[in-house]
Image (cartoon, rainbow, N blue to C red):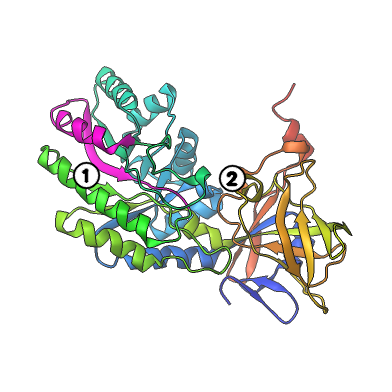
Amino acid sequence: MIGFSHTSEDLACDGVSLSAIAAAAGTPVYVYSAETLRQRYRDLDAAFGDYPHAIHYAFKANSTRALVAELRALGSAVDAVSMWEVDVARAVGFTPRQIVFDGVGKSDAELESAVALDLKAINVESAGELARVEAIAARTGVVARIAIRVNPDIDAKSHPHISTGLRINKFGIPADDVQALLPTLRDRRAIRLVAVHVHVGSQITSMDPIRGAAVRLAELARSAQRAGVTLEYVDAGGGLGISYDGGAVPSFRDYASAFIDEIRALHLPIVVEPGRSIIGPAGVLVARVLDLKPRTGFSEFAVIDAGMTELMRPALYNAFHLIEPIRARVGGLKQYEVVGPVCESGDVVGRDRMLTPLEVGDLVAIRDAGAYGVVMASNYNRRPMPAEVLVDNGTWRVIRRRQTLNDLLALET
């Protein structure tokens, strides 16, 4: 069985018991299915068919070294949003020309490094950033490859904290300003515009924002061509959502078709920057029940050993993750407020969840936690970072060990 499924005894990952992993590796622990990761990458790749395209996996979703090495082996390239992500990508074996560099606040030091590396593109997010890149390139005698990130003023209909495509969001250059900027780029010697880039948000669960982004991207590419700029590709960004709660989401095929339909006439390759849609369903967070105590007349608190320090999304976005016992007990469903151990009232992992009866010591799985899980983890309350495990072909291995006290204190004097 590929992915997470129930056996006669408990929940398994690619056929390997999560209970057995937890017994050996401890909890909390992130567990990833290598085959799910591979299958989702292949499905997205296949959705574009024979249309020229490149998949630049978004490191911000999860950049654990063993996982991105799997994606590199499949042919993925990289979308990085900091120079540290660029450095990790290069350490894994990606070449500079396989990396696009996004990010709304690139420091001068980051831009110096990016220009020197000759990345596939620096996706500039403001006229000021463009000027800084140009000045660095002119001073060092190179030609910097840039893409312009355009703010298309499109509502992705997602949580305000992960909306990026509205004019009121901090990302990108307003479309009207880009139209005025394009004619000035053709003859500038220190920079070369290789692409236009649109990214309207994260966790997009309907086709309307995707179609809107595709239309806007095609319009911008045509404007660049009219301005005499020869583009190498268009960058469609990422943002495709996954089904955390069982609801419908756009398919990879529908997503790809929306961009191909608009871009085909321009004969330009398409770059996409998926993160969550590739890695999200490939991971779960396994936690243990520490305590049970009354909450209301008909519900209990289930205190588990994972919380906002391991999985920030519920506290940050009120995000939903399916929670299920790894070994379901016999009995009618009970209502639980599943909370973490952190000394914050907002440390709630799941509200009003109907689960089979829990007892102290039971294990639960927090599903679809592969994206924006461990990368957003913290040491608040001096809690150590959790271990991570990769299951592959019937066996498992630790790909990041749990932090120790020595690790926590290593940088302090």
Q: Contact, CB < 8 Å: mark 1 with mark 2?
A: no
- In terms of image quadrants, where is residue 117? top left
| Amino acid bearing label 2 | Val
Q: Which residues are magenta?
A: 173-202
Closer to us: 240 or 169: 169
Q: Position of residue 358 (x, y in %)?
A: 83, 67
Label 1 vs 2, first from the N-terminus: 1
**Mark 2 Cα within 10 Å, few/some/many (few <14, many 20+)?**
some
User: Between marks 1 and 2, how big is the CA–CA gap?
Assistant: 33 Å
Residue in the image at 64% along x and 68% along y: 395
Q: Is residue 77 above or below residue 224?
A: below
Residue at label 2? 375
Residue at label 1? 220
Q: Position of residue 238 (x, y in %)?
A: 40, 52
- In terms of image quadrants, where is residue 259? bottom left
| Amino acid bearing label 1 | Leu
Residue in the image at 56% along x and 69% along y: 246
Closer to us: 31 or 313: 313
Q: Secondary structure at mark 2?
A: helix
Q: Is residue 253 left or right of residue 9?
A: left
Q: Position of residue 97 (x, y in %)?
A: 32, 42
Image quadrant for the N terminus?
Answer: bottom right
